[in-house]
Image (cartoon, rainbow, N blue to C red):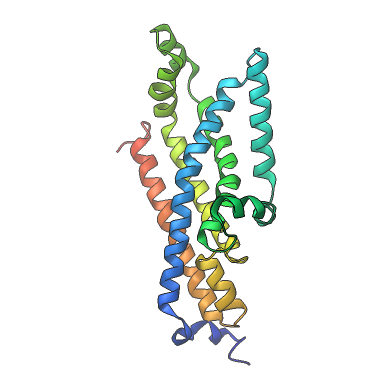
């Protein structure tokens, strides 16, 4: 059996360019963290907008809700690899290039923010309405209710949602790498698949799994600390 296609081809570690692997790992982590911060902000804003305008009888509120829901539903439904190609002109205008880690950011953010927004909206709807009514009875303004009731009460669900979103983003960075966005996905495709170097593909896969594991562990720890129902 050929050494390039057999099972043993996964273990030629001398063929791995470790500095390039480390550089690609840093790019993947950077893309994930940077986009995740912006996704968290945009997702909370979109989710809050959906929550606040749900069931309103005001024409403008209903219009805002409809447009926001349309944006969220459309962009969370478009396959990521298609979205990258669709947004190439926008990416070029925003970051000046369609290649490299920066070029992946617009697609990562636009695809993940609507996904997280729905989680935020659901988290807000799961809050006991009596808590909100109590705050209103005490004279709290709408903004006070948002940052003193909605956000604290839903924080475990919000963190859990951003953890799931972060893991999805890691997978998205790998797909973006196939069309030149850098990171481990790009390395696995160019130096692994196209060069018939299965070891590079295996190592890149293992590192991605480790990054996912760390992300999930951190998320679970924070949720446990925030959840009032769990003894710390």
Taking depth in this image into account, of 162 and 87 the one nearest to the observer is: 87
Task: Decide if residue 38 is on the left or right side of residue 66.
Answer: left
Taking depth in this image into account, of 45 and 224 the one nearest to the observer is: 45
Residue at (45, 51) in percent of width and height: 34
Residue 55: which quarter of the image? top right
Locate the C terminus and report the quarter of the image it occupies.
Answer: top left
Percent x, y of residue 183: 50, 65
Image: 208 above or below 34? below
Residue at (32, 36) in percent of width and height: 231
Task: Decide if residue 64 is on the left or right side of residue 232.
Answer: right
Taking depth in this image into account, of 128 and 36 the one nearest to the observer is: 36
Image: 155 above or below 128? below
Residue at (59, 72) in percent of width and height: 189
Percent x, y of residue 114: 59, 40
Percent x, y of residue 163: 47, 46
Residue 92: which quarter of the image? bottom right
């Amino acid at each position: 059996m050929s050494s390039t296609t057999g099972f043993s081809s996964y273990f030629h570690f001398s063929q791995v360019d470790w500095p390039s692997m480390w550089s690609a790992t840093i790019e993947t982590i950077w893309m994930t963290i940077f986009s995740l911060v912006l996704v968290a902000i945009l997702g909370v804003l979109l989710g809050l907008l959906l929550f606040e305008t749900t069931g309103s009888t005001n024409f403008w509120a209903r219009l805002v809700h409809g447009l926001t829901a349309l944006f969220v539903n459309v962009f969370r439904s478009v396959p990521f690899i298609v979205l990258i190609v669709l947004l190439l002109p926008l990416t070029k205008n925003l970051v000046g290039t369609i290649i490299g880690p920066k070029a992946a950011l617009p697609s990562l953010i636009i695809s993940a923010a609507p996904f997280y927004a729905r989680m935020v909206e659901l988290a807000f709807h799961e809050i006991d309405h009596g808590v909100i009514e109590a705050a209103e009875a005490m004279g709290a303004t709408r903004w006070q209710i948002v940052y003193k009731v909605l956000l604290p009460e839903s924080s475990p669900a919000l963190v859990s949602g951003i953890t799931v979103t972060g893991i999805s983003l890691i997978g998205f960075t790998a797909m973006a790498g196939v069309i030149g966005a850098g990171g481990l996905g790009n390395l696995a495709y160019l130096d692994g698949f196209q060069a018939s170097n299965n070891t590079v593909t295996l190592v890149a896969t293992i590192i991605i799994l480790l990054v996912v594991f760390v992300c999930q562990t951190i998320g679970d720890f924070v949720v446990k600390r925030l959840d009032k129902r769990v003894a710390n």
